[in-house]
Structure formats: C-alpha cells, structure tokens
C-alpha cells in the first residue's frame, strides 16, 4: 500500500512539473489543439496555480467547460523579442498594421458568437473609418487583405476563432470569399494578459508617442505591490514580494539571467539563504535543473518542454547562421562591428552555395547576419554594446572544444 502511495505521489509531482513547463512555453493551452497537455493542467490545476502565484505572481485560469487554460504572464520589463508572428513559412513578426488590425478585429468579434469573413471585414472597415487616428481598412488592397488574414489565422491558432466552413486564406485572393466562423468570446477576452485595460489609460493620441513607456508601465502595474507612483513598494512585505516575483518571472521566462542585469536588491535576495533555497525549490517542483554561475543563473529543462524556441536550431536558416557566427564572436572578446559579421555571413554563403537561398541577394549577407544576431540576443548569448556586437558569458556553453579521441579520453582518465 505504501509503495502504491509513493507511486501516486511521484506521478502527481511529475504531472505538476510537466504542467508548469507546458504553460511556460505556451501560456494558452486549449483542449482542441493540445488535449493531452490540457488534461494534465486541468487535473493538477490547484498545485500548478499555487506555484505560479507564489513564485511569479501570475494568475492561471483553467476553464474545463470551455476547454482552455490561460496563464497571464505579466512582465515588469518590456520585451520585444517575442512578437506575434505570421503563420506562414517565413514566420515574419507582425508589423504595426497587423497589431492594429488585431485589436480592431478582436473588438468587433465580441458582437456575436457567429460571423463571416466578409461581414467582419465590413465591421472593421466601418470601425477604422470612424477612428480619426487608425488608417481605414481597405479590402480592395491585397496587402490589406493579407494582413487581415494573418490576424484571423493567429486568432484561429489561439482557439478564439474556429472555421466552420470555408478557408480563411481564400480571402487573400478574393474579397468575395465565403468563410463562416464560430467566435469564443470568453477565450477572446482572456487573450489580454495586462492587469489594467488600455481604456483606463486613455490619453490624447498626440501624447501616446512621448509617453509610450509610461503607458506600458501603467498596463502592467499591480496594486498588490503597493507602488506609490514612483515604482517603489510602500512596505517591507510588499518589497520582498516584489523582489521574489520580479526575479522568478525573469528566471523562468528568460533563457539566462545575468547578475549584471539585476538590481542590487535583487542580487542580495538571490544571494541570501532564503532566496537561494526558494530558487532551488521552485526549480525542483517545476522539473528544472538550477544552475548558478559566477555570471548569473539558468534553469535547464532536460525535456525541453518549457520553451517555445530552441537553440541550437537547425530548422531555420537564421538559427544555423547564429550558431556558426557565435564561434566568430567567441574568438573576439572585445566584440565585432556589424560590418565584420556581414562579411562573415558572406563567407558562409560562399562556403555553402546550396544553403540559405533566400539570402542570396546583394543585401543578403547583411540581412543574414542581422537575423542571426537577433537570434543570439534573444537567447541572451550576445549583446549590442557601443556599436559592437559581443558574446555574453552563456555563449561559452556552445564553444567548439578541442577534438577528443579515445586515446585522449583514456589519458585524461
């Protein structure tokens, strides 16, 4: 009996850890798109919810009847490395027009549980025409129709929009295309993770640009920390709560957390016996391996469940180029100028003539280097500093070592 009880405890612990890591990679899990993952989260929602609330201050909402689990990941720092992407072969990030249409489309979808692609387009056209700031939506333009379709396909991937009949992509070729949708308004309203609605921060359009960072801070400000208006918690208890949540949010969500990027208080918290114990306990409960180095901290997921992107990545040209250019950066501790990396990318293109066909243009080498550096900076492996690009300490994990043979291994043993 005790052996069975132990097995049940181990099974529950493993499922909780798996659910936590699945939600870190995909904060919105639906029964329709990931039934096995949703079942794990639904089954262990209580301990998973408590883990996220205690360590990160994040809210998890699980709706078994509606078939979705939504983790509201609030960040205290603005991150441009995780944009919405077009669901096409290039996975190009959304531009400003697509983000604008996403907001307008989402608002218009709340009008009813069923709609068509043409009727929705008409509503978007009317809404944008009545707005003095947003450019009017024009279905006569193929570029506009493609942007509109990219938005709809993104909402489909979230499960907020379901195609009942037809194909969304057909609207790109003809504005007369017939597509019928079912709208999940409940899920649609959960997509916005910000604790404060944008309407509460309404300001004149001409003030948005100059106050952009201030407005973004207003969207994610949480009263539980008692901020006094200057960004400072108003009590010692709230200060410690803020430290714990701000540290763990970055620890679980960023590829690497460098000491240099932490405040003095945050470094002190992690150096304390309590902070270090909490970090190790959180990692163990979530199935991570906690690594502490002189330069910073890292949570390693042996199963690779907790990330929506991986490095090294041999499935993308930019990912392969990033790994190849990383060797060059590691050989230059002081860093390299962008032009030097452009030249190195050109050498790669000449060395592998059948590779990276989309970059074989006049500006191809420069674009390849730019895309590769974006991958490296996104994973905390490189940074822009003083007009140079240099490798960061975590990049040493991917350094090419001296070749080893059986004889050398025997000698070292």
Image (cartoon, rainbow, N blue to C red):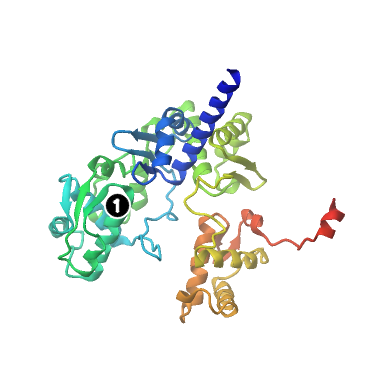
Left or right? Give the position of 223 relative to 142. right
Residue 205 lies, in percent from the top left, at 23, 55
**Could you tell whether 199 is left or right of 323 in the image?**
left
Mark 1 crowd level (few <14, some 14–19, many ≥20, 10 Å Cα): some
Where residue 127 sits, quadrant-wise, is bottom left
Residue 58 visible here: no
User: Residue 11: where, in percent of width, then height?
Assistant: 53, 30
Q: Which residue is mark 1?
A: 156
Which residue is at a point 51% across and 42% down the rendered structure image?
252
Residue lying at 59% horizontally and 63% vertically, measured from the top left: 323
Does residue 32 appear anywhere in the picture?
yes
Taking depth in this image into account, of 329 and 336 the one nearest to the observer is 329
Q: Secondary structure at mark 1?
A: helix
**Number of numbered discs visible in the structure rendering:** 1
Residue shown at the point (37%, 58%) measured from the top left: 85
Nearest the viewer among 297 and 299 is 299
How far across and how far down the image is residue 114, in percent? 16, 47
């Amino acid at each position: 009996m005790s052996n069975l009880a132990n097995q049940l405890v181990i099974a529950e612990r493993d499922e909780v850890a798996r659910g936590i890591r699945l939600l870190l990679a995909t904060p919105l899990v639906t029964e329709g798109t990931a039934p096995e993952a949703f079942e794990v989260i639904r089954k262990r929602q209580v301990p998973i919810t408590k883990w996220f609330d205690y360590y990160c201050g994040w809210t998890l909402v699980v709706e078994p009847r509606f078939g979705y689990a939504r983790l509201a990941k609030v960040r205290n720092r603005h991150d441009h490395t995780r944009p919405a992407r077009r669901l096409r072969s290039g996975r190009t990030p959304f531009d400003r027009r697509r983000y604008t249409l996403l907001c307008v489309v989402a608002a218009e979808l709340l009008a009813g549980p069923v709609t068509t692609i043409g009727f929705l387009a008409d509503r978007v056209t009317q809404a944008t025409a009545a707005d003095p700031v947003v450019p009017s939506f024009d279905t006569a333009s193929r570029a506009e129709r493609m942007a509109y379709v990219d938005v709809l396909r993104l909402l489909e991937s979230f499960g907020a929009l379901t195609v009942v009949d037809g194909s969304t992509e057909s609207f790109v070729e003809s504005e007369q295309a017939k597509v019928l949708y079912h709208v999940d308004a409940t899920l649609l309203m959960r997509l916005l993770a910000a604790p404060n609605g944008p309407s509460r921060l309404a300001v004149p359009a001409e003030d948005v640009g100059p106050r952009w960072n201030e407005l973004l801070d207003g969207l994610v400000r949480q009263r539980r920390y008692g901020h006094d208006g200057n960004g400072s918690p108003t009590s010692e208890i709230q200060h410690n709560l803020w430290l714990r949540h701000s540290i763990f949010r970055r620890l679980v969500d960023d590829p690497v957390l460098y000491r240099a990027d932490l405040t003095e208080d945050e470094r002190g918290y992690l150096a304390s016996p309590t902070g270090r114990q909490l970090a190790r306990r959180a990692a163990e409960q979530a199935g991570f391996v906690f690594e502490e180095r002189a330069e910073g901290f890292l949570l390693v997921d042996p199963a690779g469940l907790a990330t929506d992107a991986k490095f090294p990545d041999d499935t993308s040209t930019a990912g392969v180029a990033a790994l190849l250019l990383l060797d060059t950066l590691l050989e230059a501790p002081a860093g390299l100028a962008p032009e030097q990396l452009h030249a190195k990318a050109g050498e790669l293109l000449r060395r592998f003539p059948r590779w990276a066909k989309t970059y074989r243009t006049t500006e191809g080498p420069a674009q390849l280097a730019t895309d590769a550096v974006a991958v490296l900076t996104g994973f905390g492996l490189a940074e822009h500093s003083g007009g140079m690009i240099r490798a960061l300490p975590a990049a040493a994990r991917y350094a090419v070592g001296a070749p080893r043979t059986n004889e050398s291994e025997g000698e070292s043993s």
